[in-house]
Image (cartoon, rainbow, N blue to C red):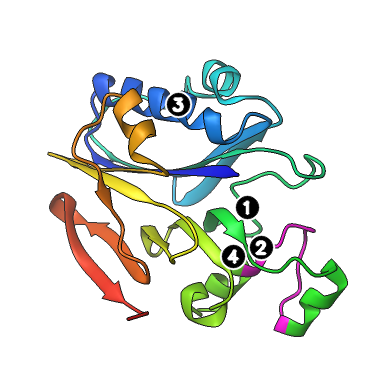
Amino acid sequence: MCSVIGVYLESPTQEQIETLKSLFVESGIRGLHASGYSVIRNGKVFTQKAPVPAHVFVESYFAELQPGDYTLQLIGHTRYSTSDLEYNQPIQVFDDCALAHNGVVDQRNAARWVEYGYQLTTLNDSELLYQSRYAGNEPLVEFPKATMAVCELSVEKGLRWYRNAGRPLYYVKVANGYFIMSTTDIAKRAGLKGAKRCKPGVIYTPQENAKLTTVKELIP
């Protein structure tokens, strides 16, 4: 079990930065062994992650996240280790995109993953989703048997989030953007109200003026 986190905030306030910290800490209940986030900065995606619980991670790695007159786009992940902590998330292979995933893509031996046609750099099956997106494909369509709740971040596309019926994902609308989390309980404990459940098979993308201007249904 893991947790995915996302945030899109135009001109984030100090209070919202504190809410984001709380969202990470509360998400730690779904993943005590590793934490990480990716953020767009200076035209690139920058990732921080460590094999520590969320409350420790927040104290060590959140100083650079400040309020201001800019758009904060960030994805995060907390993880329980089922084997090792070598390939934590968010996954980032190239400098312009990252992905955080809760779920299972393929439980077969990793040697079989080459059948999908991607050259992987890790032994984490979530990288299949990452490579799918980097190739311009849609994981919801390409991996119909996977279970997934996903937050993506790219320089070109910004923040996207989606799920299928196999994993939960929610979002909270605020005046200047969105917070994304795995459960309503996490949202409530972080002080966020009005969480809405993401529809399976729908891609959510916030754009300018903090509106959900893209809601693309891929799976009926």
Q: Amino acid at mark 2?
A: Glu
Residue contact at pointers 1 and 4, CB within 8 angstroms: yes
Q: Would you place residue 16 above or below residue 179 in this image?
A: above
Badge 3 crowding class, 10 Å Cα cut-off, few under 14, some 14 to 19, many 20 or more, is: many
Residue numbers of the magenta segment: 116-128
Instruction: Give me the C-alpha separation between circle 1 and circle 4.
Output: 7 Å
Q: Position of residue 123 (x, y in %)?
A: 79, 58
Q: Main secondary structure of the magenta part?
A: loop
Relative horizontal placement of residue 54, taking residue 125 as reference (left or right): left
Which residue has dot 3 on it? Answer: 26
- Helix, strand or loop status at disc 2: helix
Q: Amino acid at mark 3?
A: Glu
Residue 130 tag number: 4
Residue contact at pointers 4 and 2, CB within 8 angstroms: yes
- Reading the chain from its start, which is encountered first: label 1 or label 3? 3
Q: Would you place residue 53 above or below residue 107 in this image?
A: above
Instruction: Give me the C-alpha separation between circle 4 and circle 2.
Output: 5 Å
